[in-house]
């Protein structure tokens, strides 16, 4: 198995007024290709910051990250954007659909950014797969929370990513809807052989992954393989 | 997956950017329409003025021959000498001649009289264009029948009809018809002395052509089509000038006329440009909020792999498209509005303007629309570049502020563009600079006022006030507030209206003669010395005061500091103004200064006994134009006699006073014996006594011209009224733009306020309470904006009065009583009108509706 994500001695600070706040301190771990991986921890433990850094959304103050064989340090913002577009999928807690685009247009965006001509066809297939075949032309505001997150799932898989980052994917959903979305997420993940990295404080959800990284106060307190 | 992504190109192309701009734009159409509306009126104003100006210029050029009535003319204000006659003969002789002068005309039918411009013309004139008369045949018949054509408006005012008679000097003629138009004249300027046309050969019989009268002699020529007018003018001008004559061609006169209207057009264009600038400020503010609302979407797009450039371009395309749409709509509206100008400017124009579509104006409208929208939106648009994709997660990224350098560059770009555009309009770098500085200062003051206001409230926040009052004050300085933009929009609009109002006040007060107890209101010109006693007696017999008896001696300059005027004319480096060299001066002599004068420099000499070197006093504008100072020497030619003079003093003269003022004043004891005529003044308490005096003087002394200042004031008021109407018309574009910007700002800020209002209502606030908070907020903004505008206009009017009109400025209360509450209430009404829907609807419905 090859390592798709390798994080070494990562550090991230934020400044609050004159004070320097260390959010992540000496974080090192790696994720194998095709693995399902959860980052858990209480609020403020730095898990979402870690996710952002791993996905190339921000740059660390120290340490290095290698994603899909590419060292993120030294890449420009646009180069990192290209890397994300080719290799990464995202699922956000608050769905983050573009409000001015229909469900289908939202799903098609990552492929359109690649210049793919069949973006709409792929988009329709994915929406049908997530059970929204009759919602192509609905705007996000016309969909329920569960439906919006399913559109987000379809969008996340549309560019056939190597790694999918999910940030509290059920955080804004009720238990029943959340369960259905998770089921769909794992199904699609399995089908496409994507590496799945989930940030959550829901231990039940974390238990569904192969490995759990526990954070507290910006430090790793445990890195354990689950019973799966 | 059955279907694999089919990547055929390395990334999204421009087509995708267009598609994304459209997808995003169509969902935000409501908001974008308001941005578009902000510039529509500004563009319409600029395009309409520009297009009409171009049309007027080309019409004047096309109709240049009909404006003069001939190809060219030679004119002089004294009978031409042999040399000029020889030049006229060398050109094949004049095709037609004209003698014209101002004189009183009497109308026996109703025993009335009126100052008129008497024009004796020969048959055939005009060769181009026509004398428009009622009846039409009168234009030919008056020559055959020895009758007169009288200005149609004057005939209407005096209740005259064809067949009635007119007395000009010693002769009485039948009125053949009403004169509707004569080449080159505009009706409002003929209102002081309306034209009366009579046959040329009857001029001598009037007995009005005598020494002292101001008479113009014109020789009109018809030329072959291939004659080069400029060449002709250049070849003859110097020779004619040396003989006190001049040549004017149809091309040169139309150019001069074009320039005169061009200047007015430029002024109107600047007012239009202010409307456009105001619209652009509206755009900048609206885009600022629009982009802030889009930053989350920008972050998501970046997460999905969009580059900085791509996200920036999506919104830049939207703005450029809005600019193009606004530009197109504004241009279309402007092209329509220009058809109104011939009606608005009716009495001021010398020709009937045929309006056509000017392609340059269309291009200008479209380019302005796109360029100004993009330029003013650039700074807020830069926010898309600096947005971190991290914002899509719940992580608050470290605040990535926009580059200060980039912001300064954008600001610099905006000012360079405004400067270049105003330079293009004004064709003078200093005026363009002054305009940009004026705009900068006005906007800076308004920005300063609102910033100080916000800081003031923050610092001295009235914590003891009730919840509603406190909440409404808090809204003024909370994050993403609209205080600044609303104060600018309201302030600039109010500033423009009240400045126009105050300026009109200054001009009218300056022209007014009411209340000036000892000021004359009747001026008698061309009184011969031997008539003086009899005329004075006529005045005193009517129990009217003889206020002034001013001697007038006509003279020309022969040399300045030893240099002959011809030498100075030929010296291309000389800075002496041409009018000084060509003008026939009407000088006077007296022993003291009068009320309208103040000694600026040198020493006043009341009288002299020797004519060896006479100390004279000149006005400051003469000294400036003739480039002379105290101690300089001037030789005057007083009807053949040369007088050596030395500038003894320089006076400032208040020319705006309606009384006889003089450029050159001699001391007593020198000119007493020179050929002269006199100006007498009196003050008639009412129109009846004025009419009675005029009747008597016209019948007894037909050569005397009577200037009735009361009538003149009516004309001045009419003219100012007309001009201010047009300026107001243009200012309305700014005011309406201000209202649209206001609407836009309120509607855009509405989207921000909704959540807060809904939250307040969810927490139990009643609709009435939310309404009160909103009402108070707009009341504060209305008061601050309109008051700032009025106070700023007081300052600018004071500056204008002091430096431009050189007149005292006493502000009237009307702007405070009408504009201040009026505009404040308007702001309140617009604010409440736009918030009422939010307040009335159920909270959840509002949140869902506004989510897109």
Image: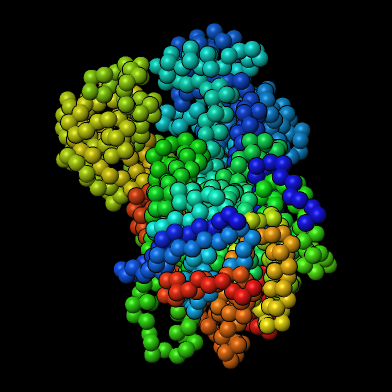
Q: In which quarter of the image is the C terminus of chain B?
A: bottom right
Q: How far across and how far down the image is residue B21, in percent?
A: 66, 53
Q: How far across and how far down the image is residue B581, in percent?
A: 35, 25
Q: Residue sitting at 81 percent across and 64 percent down?
A: A128
Q: Which of A220 and A47 is in front in this view?
A: A220
Q: Residue sitting at 35 percent across and 16 percent down?
A: B570
View extreme (right): residue:
A134
Report if residue B542 is visible in the image.
no
Report if residue B612 is visible in the image.
yes
Q: Is residue A143 above or below residue B603?
A: below
Q: Which of A56 and A5 is in front in this view?
A: A5
Q: Is residue B393 above or below residue B172?
A: below
Q: In this view, does B180 lie above or below B833?
A: above
Q: How many numbered dots are placed on residues in this image?
A: 0
Name the image quarter holding residue B740: bottom right
Locate residue B686 relative to residue B588 in the image: left or right: right
Q: Residue sitting at 62 percent across and 71 percent down?
A: A209
Q: How far across and how far down the image is residue B317, in percent?
A: 63, 49
Q: Residue sitting at 70 percent across and 38 percent down?
A: B357
């Amino acid at each position: 198995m090859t390592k798709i994500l390798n994080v070494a001695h990562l550090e991230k600070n934020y400044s609050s007024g004159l004070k320097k706040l260390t959010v992540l301190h000496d974080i090192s771990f790696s994720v194998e290709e095709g693995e399902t991986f959860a980052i858990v921890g209480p609020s403020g433990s730095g898990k979402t910051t870690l996710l952002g850094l791993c996905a190339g959304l921000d740059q660390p103050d120290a340490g290095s990250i290698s994603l899909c064989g590419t060292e993120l340090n030294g890449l420009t913002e646009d180069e990192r954007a290209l890397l994300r577009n080719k290799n990464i999928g995202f699922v956000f807690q608050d769905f983050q659909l573009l409000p001015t685009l229909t469900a289908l247009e939202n799903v098609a965006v990552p492929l359109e950014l690649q210049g793919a001509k069949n973006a709409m066809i792929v988009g329709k297939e994915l929406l049908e797969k997530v059970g929204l075949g009759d919602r192509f032309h609905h705007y996000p505001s016309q969909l329920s929370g569960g439906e919006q997150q399913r559109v987000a799932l379809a969008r996340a898989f549309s560019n056939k990513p190597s790694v999918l980052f999910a940030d509290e994917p059920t955080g804004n959903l009720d238990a029943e809807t959340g369960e259905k979305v998770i089921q769909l997420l794992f199904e699609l993940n399995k089908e496409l052989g994507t590496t799945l990295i989930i940030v959550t404080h829901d231990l039940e959800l974390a238990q569904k992954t192969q490995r759990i990284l526990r954070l507290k106060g910006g430090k790793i307190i445990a890195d354990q393989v689950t019973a799966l | 997956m059955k279907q694999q992504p089919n990547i055929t190109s390395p990334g999204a192309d421009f087509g995708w950017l267009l598609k994304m701009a459209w997808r995003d734009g169509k969902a935000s159409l409501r908001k974008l329409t308001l941005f578009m509306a902000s510039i529509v009126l500004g563009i319409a104003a600029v395009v309409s003025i520009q297009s009409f100006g171009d049309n007027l210029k080309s019409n004047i050029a096309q109709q240049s021959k009909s404006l003069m009535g001939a190809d060219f003319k030679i004119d002089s204000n004294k009978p031409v000498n042999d040399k000029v006659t020889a030049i006229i003969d060398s050109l094949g002789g004049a095709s037609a001649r004209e003698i014209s002068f101002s004189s009183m005309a009497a109308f026996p039918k109703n025993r009335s009289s009126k100052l008129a411009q008497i024009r004796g013309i020969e048959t055939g004139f005009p060769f181009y264009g026509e004398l428009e008369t009622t009846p039409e045949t009168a234009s030919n018949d008056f020559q055959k029948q020895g009758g007169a054509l009288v200005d149609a408006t004057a005939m209407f005012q005096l209740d005259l009809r064809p067949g009635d008679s007119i007395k000009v000097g010693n002769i009485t003629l039948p009125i053949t018809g009403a004169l509707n138009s004569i080449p080159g004249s505009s009706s409002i300027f003929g209102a002081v002395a309306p034209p009366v046309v009579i046959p040329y050969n009857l001029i001598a019989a009037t007995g009005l052509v005598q020494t002292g009268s101001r008479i113009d002699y014109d020789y009109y020529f018809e030329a072959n089509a291939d004659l080069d007018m400029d060449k002709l003018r250049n070849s003859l001008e110097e020779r004619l000038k040396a003989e006190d004559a001049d040549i004017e061609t149809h091309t040169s006169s139309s150019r001069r006329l074009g320039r005169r209207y061009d200047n007015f057009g430029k002024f109107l264009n600047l007012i239009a440009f202010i409307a456009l600038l105001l619209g652009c400020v509206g755009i900048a503010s609206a885009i600022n909020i629009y982009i802030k609302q889009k930053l989350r979407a920008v972050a998501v797009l970046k997460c999905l792999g969009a580059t900085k450039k791509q996200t920036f371009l999506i919104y830049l395309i939207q703005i450029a498209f809005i600019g193009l749409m606004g530009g197109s709509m504004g241009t279309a509206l402007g092209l329509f509005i220009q058809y109104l100008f011939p009606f608005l400017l009716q009495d001021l124009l010398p020709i009937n303007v045929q309006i056509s579509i000017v392609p340059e104006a269309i291009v200008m409208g479209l380019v302005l629309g796109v360029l100004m929208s993009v330029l003013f939106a650039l700074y807020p648009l830069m926010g898309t570049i600096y947005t971190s994709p991290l914002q899509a997660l719940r992580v608050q990224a470290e605040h990535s502020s926009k580059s200060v350098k980039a912001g300064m560059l954008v600001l610099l770009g905006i000012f360079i563009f405004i400067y270049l555009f105003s330079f293009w309009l004004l064709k003078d770098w200093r005026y363009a600079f002054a305009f940009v500085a004026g705009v900068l200062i006005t906007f800076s003051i308004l920005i300063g006022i609102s910033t100080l206001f916000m800081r003031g409230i923050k610092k001295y926040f009235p914590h003891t006030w009730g919840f509603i009052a406190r909440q409404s004050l808090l809204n003024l300085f909370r994050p993403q507030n609209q205080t600044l933009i609303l104060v600018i929009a309201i302030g600039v609009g109010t500033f423009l209206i009240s400045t126009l109002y105050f300026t009109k006040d200054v001009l009218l007060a300056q022209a007014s003669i009411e209340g000036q107890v000892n000021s004359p209101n009747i001026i008698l010109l061309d009184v011969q010395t031997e008539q003086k006693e009899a005329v004075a007696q006529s005045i005193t017999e009517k129990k009217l005061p003889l206020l002034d008896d001013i001697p007038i001696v006509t003279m020309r300059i022969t040399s300045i500091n030893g240099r002959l005027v011809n030498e100075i004319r030929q010296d291309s480096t000389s800075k002496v103004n041409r009018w000084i060299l060509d003008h026939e001066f009407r000088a006077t002599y007296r022993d003291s200064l009068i009320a309208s004068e103040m000694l600026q420099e040198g020493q006043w000499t009341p009288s002299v006994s020797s004519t060896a070197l006479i100390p004279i006093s000149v006005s400051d504008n003469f000294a400036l134009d003739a480039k002379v100072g105290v101690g300089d020497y001037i030789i005057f030619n007083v009807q053949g006699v040369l007088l050596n003079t030395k500038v003894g003093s320089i006076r400032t003269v208040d020319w705006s006073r309606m009384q006889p003022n003089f450029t050159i004043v001699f001391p007593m004891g020198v000119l007493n014996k020179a050929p002269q005529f006199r100006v007498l003044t009196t003050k008639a308490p009412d129109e009846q006594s004025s009419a009675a005096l005029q009747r008597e003087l016209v019948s007894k002394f037909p050569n005397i011209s009577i200037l009735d200042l009361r009538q003149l004031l009516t004309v001045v008021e009419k003219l100012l009224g007309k001009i201010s109407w047009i300026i107001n018309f243009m200012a309305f574009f700014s005011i309406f733009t201000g209202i649209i910007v206001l609407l836009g700002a309120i509607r855009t800020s509405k989207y921000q306020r909704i959540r807060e209002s809904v939250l307040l209502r969810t927490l139990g606030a009643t609709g009435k309470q939310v309404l009160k908070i909103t009402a108070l907020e707009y009341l504060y903004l209305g008061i601050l904006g309109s008051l700032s505008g009025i106070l700023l206009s007081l300052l600018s009017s004071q500056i204008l009065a002091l430096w431009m009109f050189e007149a005292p400025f006493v502000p009237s209360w009307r702007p405070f009583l009408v504009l201040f509450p009026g505009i404040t209430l308007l702001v309140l009404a617009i604010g409440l009108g736009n918030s009422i829907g939010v307040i009335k609807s159920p909270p959840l419905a509002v949140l869902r509706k506004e989510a897109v």
